[in-house]
Image: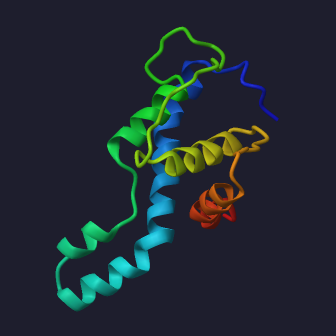
Amino acid sequence: SNNGNDWGEDLKQKIPTLLAGVFSLFTVLKSGASYNRIEAAAGSSVLGEKLLMKPHGIQVLTLLFLLGCGKRGQTSLESLMMQIRTGEGKSMILGAAAVVFALLGFRVRTVCYSEYLSTRDFKLFECVFDR
């Protein structure tokens, strides 16, 4: 079990690759079959590309910042508070962060004031959590 006290450069250099793997798996599991059907029917990947469920650049950057990437000399996780407004992808950020922390050996628990939002966000990443 990890406690976040060994958050050195070696670990931080692995995070972008780990995050890319998490988002790749998420995209394939959530929309890979639909993409393949549309591509086969249309003979082109243009429409399929628009339908892929994948992270936006700002979501990836937010996660990299939260995980300490780009901050030299940081050897432990810092407590950070960030404001992510409605519609900016908190569900995607939360799900990916939970997976990354779990893969790094942390015991992950997420809490939300709303049972509806908790259930919705869990279902969004459930296919990845199950893997």
Tell me where residue 90 appears, x and y as whole percent: 51, 45
Q: In front: 87, or 97?
A: 87
Quadrant housing residue 106: top right
Residue at (63% x, 13% y) in the render: 75
Residue at (48% x, 11% y) in the render: 72
Residue placed furthest toward the right: 1
Q: In front: 29, or 90?
A: 90
Quadrant housing residue 79: top right
Residue placed furthest toward the top: 73
Q: In front: 19, or 109?
A: 109
Q: In front: 91, or 116?
A: 116
Above or below, 100 against 21 in this view is: above
Tell me where residue 95 appears, x and y as whole percent: 59, 50
Q: How many marks?
A: 0
The answer to whether 72 appears left or right of 121 in the picture is left
Tell me where residue 89 appears, x and y as whole percent: 45, 48
The N terminus appears in which quarter of the rendering? top right
Above or below, 90 against 126 in this view is: above
Residue at (65% x, 45% y) in the render: 98
What kind of colouring is applied to the model shown? rainbow
Residue at (50% x, 61% y) in the render: 26
The C terminus appears in which quarter of the rendering? bottom right
Tell me where residue 115 appears, x and y as whole percent: 72, 57
Quadrant housing residue 103: top right
The answer to whether 47 appears left or right of 112 in the picture is left
